[in-house]
Image: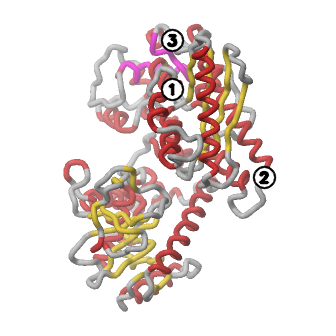
Amino acid sequence: MLSEVLLDAGVVTRCRRRVHLEHDPAMRKVELPPPDPTIEQRIADAAAHRAAIADRLRAANPGRWVTVPAELPATDWVWLTERALAEGVPFVWGATLPADRAAGRRGGVELLVHTGAGYLPVLVVRHRITDRGEGAITTALTDLDPGNAAVDPERKVRSQPRDQLRLAHVRRLLEAAGHAEPGRALGGVIGLDADVVLWHDLTAPTWPGGRTALEEYDTRFADRLAVARAAAGRAAPLAEPSRVLECRRCPWWSTCEAELMRARDVSLVVRGEDAAELRKAGIATVDALAALGSETEPPVPWTGGPFADAVALARAWLADLAVVRRVPEVVVPRADVEVDIDMESFGDAGAYLWGCLLSGVDIGMPRGYRAFATWEPLPTPDEARSFAEFWAWLREVRARAAAVGLTFRAYCYNALAENRWLFGSVERFAGMPGVPGRAEVTEFVESEAWVDLFQCVSDQFLCAQGKGLKVVAPVAGFRWRDPEAGGEASMRWYRAAVGMDGGIPDPGQRERLLRYNEDDVRATRALRTWMSGPAMSEAPFMADL
């Protein structure tokens, strides 16, 4: 029966094609890749985070708690939850609500809180939910009464749409079960910092167009339910494959990629929403896009930058070119004294390593690679020490160069990451020995001395296979020594390096991380050296394609 298609909250932020594949009976025999160890570790970390929060909440809120044991069969989860709700238990941890079969909905939540009139959901998540600012509605972490919530003068809401949509999903399940708090459609979230409960009003017009979270959820869920039911009933699919950002980590990507390659689909070179508009206009393939004139105005509403770039990208893809020049002459800011910088962080927990490569004119400091690291598991105050040492070293390099009249520049690849932890470190460790003030960091970041090589690449090249450093640097002839080099792999290496899972810290993994970081900074140096010369002869100009 179609009503037996039951969807959880995750579908509303999931690709429509993935929803189709997950419910198409013909795809049940497709062998998916093994689970990504990094994703599995994140799931384990999230479970440990939830368990720690549960202990704190129980200790601070004495009274009757019911915990639904995760090790029991799923059918028992629902039965235990229903019994607790029927009895009006104040706090239900690990709740799984009865499925709403008519609406095609199922799911649960970390915590249900009884208000006297009904239940409100509280999520426990392992990501940050607020930023510095004001306006968030919060209570103290252990205060689970939204009646005590007030505007927080120190926090603003960080955009996390999936949290609000998940709360809306649970709200609808509570309504179907007859246990929703009737007066207020509220939901709480406890995040990684575990310092407050952030309360969301799901009926407030906080979404684009003045929509509420519940309205946004209802629209998305109805769409995904239609997609899933069509797939389950083997009707004409309501979602065709198209490359989007989510594809990078989707277990079904190889299935979709094969279809897209066979069709030479236009989404292989342009972003998802633009690809959809092109298909509507009959430009469904890379070949059709490449055949358009370079000066052609976009035939559809367009969001992806100059349309001529899209045409050139299509032509580069057909020619199997990774990089094409957008400009007649490539220019990279250079200096007498140069430093390449790469930071390694562990999720939102902190930055444990700042790697630097000093090159150029001799200023009396050892040239080559140098690392500033803490090998205490993050978060740790020792991060302040390593950051302060890095900054003191960088400050001295700049000062020595200036003292003898030499120019200086520092380079990174995608400054968003480095800048986040430059300013984050200043804020978190303000006043600690050697930690600079915000004004000093701002002066550096906003100066011509800080060069984002990613932006240089974006401004001057079209990259048909992506603009990541691991994709672009090999064009300049650079190769990483570690065949597994990558951000996701480094997360696993870090856990072993610091003994995060209760084991003995592994010095070999520390050396592996240092080698990986050194290769990253050497890759940026190799790339800008290539851009300063050989790129002019080795990278074709887009107008010549």
Q: Amino acid at mark 2?
A: Asp
* Residue at image point 21% right, 56% down: 205
Looking at the rendering, the stretch of residues picked out in magenta corresponds to 308-327
Q: Nearer the viewer, residue 522 or 473?
A: 522
Dot 2: element: loop
Mark 2 crowd level (few <14, some 14–19, many ≥20, 10 Å Cα):
some
Mark number displayed over residue 330: 3
Q: Nearer the viewer, residue 378 or 103?
A: 378
Residues at badges 2 and 3 in contact (C-beta under 8 Å)? Answer: no
Dot 3: element: loop
- Assign the N terminus to one quadrant of the image: bottom left
* Residue at image point 51% right, 12% down: 331
> Mark 2 or mark 3, which is nearer to you?
2
Q: Amino acid at mark 3?
A: Val
Q: Nearer the viewer, residue 264 or 79?
A: 79
- Position in image of residue 223 (x %, y %): 31, 56
Q: Amino acid at mark 1?
A: Asp
Quick one: label 1 or label 2, which is nearer the N terminus?
Answer: 1
- Position in image of residue 364 (x %, y %): 72, 19
C-alpha gap between disc 3 and disc 1:
15 Å
Residue 389, compared with residue 329, is above or below; it is: below
Residue on which disc 1 sits: 452
Q: In the visual, does 481 lie left or right of 191? A: right
User: Would you say residue 411 sits in the magenta stretch?
Assistant: no
C-alpha gap between disc 2 and disc 3:
44 Å
Residue on which disc 2 sits: 506
